[in-house]
Amino acid sequence: MPGRPPLLADDVVEGALTELQWIRNGNRLEKTVKRADFAGAMRFVNAVAELAEEADHHPDITIAWNTVTLALWTHVSGGITAADLELAAKIDALG
C-alpha cells in the first residue's frame, strides 16, 4: 500500500540487532532500561520523547518506578522498518 514504509527482511533486522541494545519480540523491537530511581527514569523518558518528536516516530513506553520499557515498530506497516532501527540507535546513544 502506498505511503507505508516497507518492512525490513528478517536478516536485515537480525543483523542490525548485533549492533543495537534491543531484542526482537515478534514484529517489534523492545528494550528495558533501569535507572537509579523514578526521577532518573523520567529524565530518560523525556530524552526519548525529544528524539521521538524529532523523528516523528514514537515508541510505546511503559514506566514502572525506575524501569522503562520501550517498544518500537511502525504501526502503519505492521512491523519493523528502517525508522525503527534509526530511532533505536539514537535511543541507545542516550546510554
Image: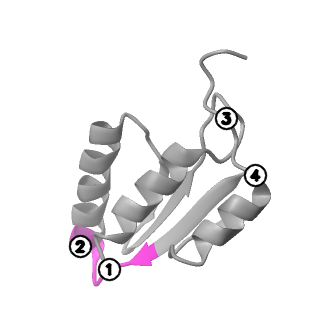
User: Which circle, 4 or 1, is nearer the viewer?
Assistant: 4
CA neighbours of label 2 inside 10 A, class few (<14), some (14 to 19), many (20+): some
N-terminal of the two: label 1 or label 3? 3
Specify the amino acid type for callout 1.
Arg
Asked if labels 3 and 2 touch by Cβ distance under 8 angstroms, the answer is no
Relative to 38, residue 79 above or below:
above
Asked if labels 1 and 4 touch by Cβ distance under 8 angstroms, the answer is no
Relative to 49, residue 77 above or below:
above
Kindly identify the residue that appears in the image at 55 percent across and 47 percent down.
Answer: 82
Q: Position of residue 33 (x, y in %)?
A: 43, 75
Real-space CA distance between mark 2 and mark 4, rounded to the nearest whole angstrom: 35 Å
The answer to whether one can see residue 26 in this image is: no
Judging by the rendered image, the residue that carries numbered circle 3 is 6
Judging by the rendered image, the residue that carries numbered circle 1 is 35
Judging by the rendered image, the residue that carries numbered circle 4 is 9
Kindly identify the residue that appears in the image at 53 percent across and 49 percent down.
Answer: 84
Q: Position of residue 55 (x, y in %)?
A: 34, 40
N-terminal of the two: label 4 or label 1? 4
Nearer to the camera, 8 or 21:
8
Real-space CA distance between mark 2 and mark 1, rounded to the nearest whole angstrom: 5 Å
Specify the amino acid type for callout 4.
Ala
Judging by the rendered image, the residue that carries numbered circle 2 is 40
CA neighbours of label 4 inside 10 A, class few (<14), some (14 to 19), many (20+): few
Element under disc 2: helix
CA neighbours of label 3 inside 10 A, class few (<14), some (14 to 19), many (20+): some
**Occupied quadrant, residue 77:** top right
Kindly identify the residue that appears in the image at 36 percent across and 75 percent down.
Answer: 66
Real-space CA distance between mark 4 and mark 1, rounded to the nearest whole angstrom: 33 Å
Relative side of 64 to 22, left or right:
left
Q: Position of residue 16 (x, y in %)?
A: 59, 67
**Occupied quadrant, residue 38:** bottom left
